[in-house]
Amino acid sequence: MLELKGIDVYYGDLQALRGVSLTVGAGEVVSVIGSNGMGKSTTLKAISGLLHPRAGSIQFQGRDITRLTPSAIVELGISHVPEGRQVFPSLTVLENLEMGAQFPEPIRRAGQTLEQVFAYFPRLKERLKQKAGTLSGGEQQMLAIGRGLMSLPSLMMLDEPSLGLSPLLVETIFEIIEQINQQGTSLLVIEQNVFHALGISHRGYVLEDGGVALSGPSRELLADPHVRKAYLGL
């Protein structure tokens, strides 16, 4: 479904990604783990068109999207739930969700998609008229994921979905991520909570110094001595 081939990404003269290659297959959950500053969020920004690689290519369902605009990439079926939620604080919950449906098919199916979002996150239905800026951190994360679902993505990218959440809410969010995948959406998950990330994913990649240091089935990465020592403290 998604294939990155040797992408290099820079911020000015600073190279953030070095020859990163990864794939996401249809129906897969793929996790990308690593410490802060290793290129995880930059990878998602490159896929969603917020940054353009200087080298390499990005293909989605056989189409080159390396130079497409973010809106064109969303319309093709990729949604990006950014780190830190980034909801529209002055808009209501409903208005935030509606912002996720901006193209003909998502608009046509918005009512049906809203019901699916409420099935995942009943709390959002209770707060439809509430300003997003007054929600708790966990509720804002639910809203950000719900907004991402409104575009009817075939691939959803989540950047640090557990950041700043209580342990109980972390469990809830990851359970819902699994449910979204079971409904047929492929997922690319960036996450510092390595145990949870590898626990829900089929495969994983370890980014270090802007490049892929390790990759493989999630079970194998969980058992890898370097991963256990560096990221799990075992």
Image: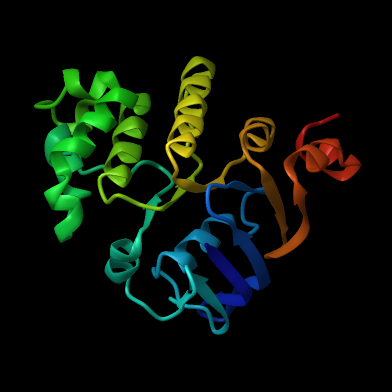
The residue lying at 69 percent from left, 47 percent from top is 203
The residue lying at 63 percent from left, 34 percent from top is 193
184 w.r.t. 10: above or below: above
In-front residue for pair 191/5: 5
Give the x, y percent position of residue 19. 68, 75
Q: Quadrant of the C terminus?
A: top right
Instruction: Please identify the residue farthest to the left as the structure is shown.
Output: 129
197 w.r.t. 3: above or below: above
Give the x, y percent position of residue 209. 72, 63
Q: Is residue 3 left or right of residue 159?
A: right
Give the x, y percent position of residue 198. 68, 37
Give the x, y percent position of residue 172. 47, 21
218 w.r.t. 56: above or below: above
6 w.r.t. 116: above or below: below
Quadrant in which residue 220 is drawn: top right
> Does residue 91 appear anywhere in the picture?
no
Q: Is residue 41 left or right of residue 131?
A: right
Instruction: Please identify the residue farthest to the right as the structure is shown.
Output: 225
Instruction: Please identify the residue farthest to the top as the structure is shown.
Output: 168
Q: Is residue 91 left or right of residue 181?
A: left
> Does residue 233 appear anywhere in the picture?
yes
The residue lying at 62 percent from left, 62 percent from top is 23
Quadrant in which residue 86 is drawn: top left
* Label tally: 0
Q: Is residue 114 left or right of residue 85?
A: left
The residue lying at 16 percent from left, 43 percent from top is 110
Rendered image coloring scheme: rainbow
